Amino acid sequence: MFANFSITMDKISQPLVSIIILNYNAGQLLLDCVESIMQTNYGNFEVIVVDNASRDESHRKCKDFFENIRLIENGKNLGYCAGNNVGIKNAKGDFIVILNPDTTVEPDWLSELIIMYNKYGEALYQPKHLSLKNKSVFMSAGNMMNVFGFGYAREKGRKDINQYNVVEQIGYASGTCLFAPSSVFKKVGLLDPFIFLYHDDLDLGWRAAQLGIKSYYVPTSVIYHAESYMLGWSSEKFFWLERNRKYCLQTHYSKDTYSKIHSTLMLVDLLVWLFYLSKGFLGAKIKAELDLRKNRKKIADRYEYLEHLKKISDKDLIMNLPDVMHIPSNVTGKNTNSIFNKLIKRLSQRAKKSISD
């Protein structure tokens, strides 16, 4: 009797956290993810599995194993953003976690995030992401972005030797595991369904930053992430990455900012064309450009909406962005990565000078 009373009191004293897992044919990964969540030492959470019309029955198997989870079945694949939005809209918690199904978590992952919220307040938070395959290797030590809208997972593929073991502000919190009070989504809005997948987290973090809401990396909270089980480094993935990068640039920068850095953006675009050509993904780049042209009206409307909401200027945000970026060596190779970084650094410094003049 006393043990049950203690559990009840824990739930009363701890705010409810809604953990949203969007599933699409994740198989055993989904069950492993939920199993690890059930070992969490934080006492008050709900798990919401939103299924995007999986064919592998993983969502139903998960519900059979874990009867207490809430299962929401979408009639079709809504994409990453709209699918997660279904979960957010149905969440009851004071806090929201968006968690990929190809992850597992340490028992104290959630309590550590709550501790940091109590210290830093309303913000977006990201745990330390380590590889599920090799738990001494980073998947992300905080996500970053640069002036050209390139988002990247800091330190991805590099060994964790405690080089990023302090809480710090980052560019944006990774959508692999993103924690925030529900009030952030009420202020910033939900994930943008137009993005569908990839750079959705960058867009969310960018919108938050424009409202003065920061993003933090929390290394005391640890999760493990498998390499993408969906698209890998494919032509389709590169289409979404490039289309959404340019969409974010066109919707987040003011017309004045865009005009000041336009010539530099053109040079960056030339580098991207050459990169896609070298990787055999030229079709993905062409497809991205055509899709942006087709959706000019939608982009213009989104721009007007976001521009009206801004509280922080483009200049103030841009001057704090890093000039370099990290691309995993398995994508470009070390030599190409080094050359690309040197070019991006010089172009970033040029863009910042154009804005500050």
Image (tube, rainbow, N blue to C red):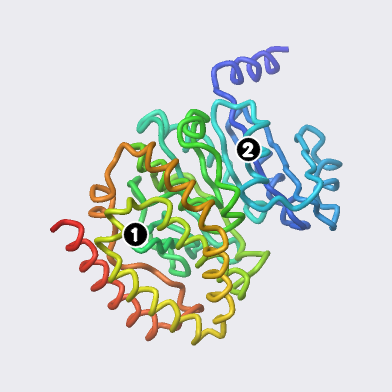
The answer to which image quadrant residue 21 occupies is: top right
Which disc number belongs to residue 125? Answer: none
Inspect this view and state whether residue 255 appears.
Answer: yes
Which disc number belongs to residue 163? Answer: 1
Quick one: label 2, few (<14), some, or many (20+) residues within 10 Å? many
* 126 on left or right of 58: left
Provide the secondary structure element on which disc 2 rests.
Answer: strand
Inspect this view and state whether residue 218 appears.
Answer: no
In this rendering, the count of numbered labels is: 2
Measured from the top left, where is residue 312 in percent x and y?
29, 40
Identify which residue is drawn at 68% across, 46% down. Answer: 83
Measured from the top left, where is residue 22 in percent x and y?
68, 48
Provide the secondary structure element on which disc 1 rests.
Answer: loop
Q: Nearer the viewer, mark 1 or mark 2?
A: 2
The answer to whether residue 351 is above or below residue 209 is below
Labels 1 & 2 near each other (Cβ < 8 A): no
Quadrant, the C terminus: bottom left
Identify which residue is drawn at 50% across, 51% down. Answer: 201
Quadrant, the N terminus: top right
Of 241 and 155, which appears nearest the observer? 241
* Disc 2: which residue: 19
Identify which residue is drawn at 69% across, 36% down. Answer: 47
The answer to whether residue 354 is above or below residue 276 is above
Measured from the top left, where is residue 116 in percent x and y?
41, 35
> Which residue type carries mark 2?
Ile
Identify which residue is drawn at 51% across, 49% down. Answer: 222
The answer to which image quadrant residue 190 occupies is: top right
The answer to whether residue 128 is above or below residue 111 is below
